[in-house]
Amino acid sequence: MGLEAIKDQLNSGETNIVNDNWDVIVAAHGKLIALYREYVKGDQRLELTDERAKLMGILKEEGERFKINYCKPVRDKLANRLEMRQMKADNDPATKWAESFAKDVRFDGLQVDVYKATVGEGDSFLMVDSMPLDDGEFPGLVKEPAYNGHTGVIAVYDVTKRFIVAVVKIWDDPVITDEDTLRVNIYYADRIEMFTDDGELKPFVDPKNEESVIPWIGNKSKTALGVPFFHFKNDAEDGTETGQAHIKSIISSQDAINYIGLDIVGAAGLTATPPKFTVGLPVFDGDVRIGMLLALDPDGTDTDKHKPQVGTFAQGKTDPLVDAAKFFVDQLGAASSTPLPDTMGSSASSGEALKQREVDQIQMADVLQTKFGNVLEDVFAYANMLQNELGNNAPPESKTWDAKWKSAQTRSDSDIIKNIVAVKDFLDQRTILEEIGKITTFQWDTARIDEILLRRREEIDQVNNPPVPPGTPETGDLDTLLGQIEGLGNAVAG
């Protein structure tokens, strides 16, 4: 059953919301997600033949250890340029709420996982969770992986491919179901339908609510709350429901590098311990391995033409293989616009070419900041709305939300401060502190900036209005002042 049964359930309403081949398309994309996920981890396609394994003196399964994983650094080089520093509202109270919400859900670390998954696999999701509102102030925020052919999240879009109308979440729940049974939830704008899948899709009754369908309606507005999932897509084209993995273009180069790596190891072994051979002599050693002995004409049938002899093959050269590996590493960096450290020093690429890759990757990061920023703005707006509808404390609202990002360019803190100081005469104090606060060393939020400004004002007030010594008359009390002066004069005269 699986996806086909889920497709039927999605289309069980008055109108179909997915096509007839939806399950086939989702399954195919799930295989790609699984492939990309494995490649980033280093579980890449590399199969040794029995002969090659014998030649290298290892077990066939041990070929895994000779993989050189470039997919992870290629993913990380781009993903590590992405860091949202602040979600700014159209008023200070709402901005402070966003800062408190981000701290509560530990967004600083959460966003790293989301960006790496999205860049590496093409898709990832954030779910705004209402459960923490039962006994806390803020809703939760949970990273959900894309569907990999077994478990994960699938977004269902409307006909325009712009708006999510439903989300399917499939996962293992060993607490409630056995190992052969999956949990399936379908999230709509106004309800959540729950199922189990053990080969057949069956309604699942929630022990808490004793229902298999939970209404998803606001307590205040009494209207649908909307689908609580938000889709991050890497390099997605208009009209597509899924993104593309950043490592998609380097899979073939990665495979070539792995196989060439095996050739280099094998060639190096044969060069260090070259094979020997015999002619017209019995076989002493026929194993295929480094240092092997090959018997040519072991029965001596050609002794009339060749005298019996023992010899050593000429040593091989690894230079051509190393050059081939460098070529594919260079192609890998060019295809992904990645200035890899390995290509900086050993590649045939010029310095200008490597600088151009840096520029290209920064431009990629800028585009992702815009697109991911739009998704995050929707996330914070939804979390704010959900807390207002289901929470115990209504948060300050905002009509607009604006994601503020750390620059994708790699610059030192001192350079950033110098740039701010250069234009300080044209900026107010709060703007200066907000820019300095974005620096990794400081990371000041609005509350910290308010505190700094308050202390600064107090210091200025103390300088301009120093404390009055005890016994000093209040300004304007002329009679008292004159009396003190007269008393001082009498004391001196006496």
Image (cartoon, rainbow, N blue to C red):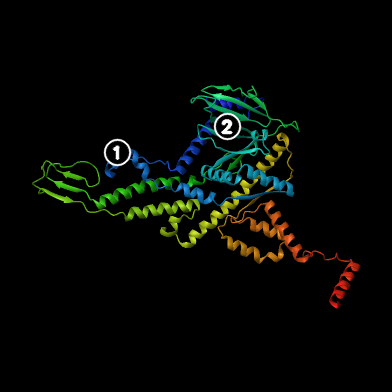
Estimate how packed mark 1 is, as few (under 14), some (14 to 19) or many (20 or more) residues with alpha carbons within 10 Å. Answer: few
Q: Amino acid at mark 2?
A: Lys
**Residue 171 image point, x, y percent:** 54, 31
- Image position of 137 (left or right of 7): right
- Mark 2: secondary structure: strand
Residue tagged 2? 169
Q: Secondary structure at mark 1?
A: helix
Spatial CA span between label 1 and label 2: 42 Å
**Residue 27 position within the rendered picture, expressed as x and y whole percent measured from the top left:** 51, 32
Q: Residue at x 23, y 50 (%)?
A: 273
> In what quadrant of the picture does the C terminus appear?
bottom right
Report if the CB atoms under discs 1 and 2 are less than 8 Å apart.
Answer: no
Q: Nearer the viewer, mark 1 or mark 2?
A: 2
Callout 2 crowding tier (Cα within 10 Å): few <14, some 14–19, many ≥20: many
Q: On the rendered structure, is 60 left or right of 350?
A: left
Please tell me which residue lies in front, 142 or 53.
142
Name the outermost residue toward the left. Answer: 304
Whole-percent x, y for residue 159 in the image:
64, 35
Q: Is residue 202 above or below residue 466?
A: above
On screen, residue 37 above or below 360: above
Q: Residue at x 63, y 64 (%)?
A: 419
Which residue of the protein is positioned furthest toward the bottom in this rendering?
Answer: 493
Residue name at image x 60 percent, y 52 percent? 366
Looking at marks 1 and 2 on the same chain, the residue that comes earlier in the sequence is marked by 1
Residue 236 showing in the rendered view: no
Which numbered circle lies on residue 50?
1
The one nearer the camera, 18 or 451, is: 451
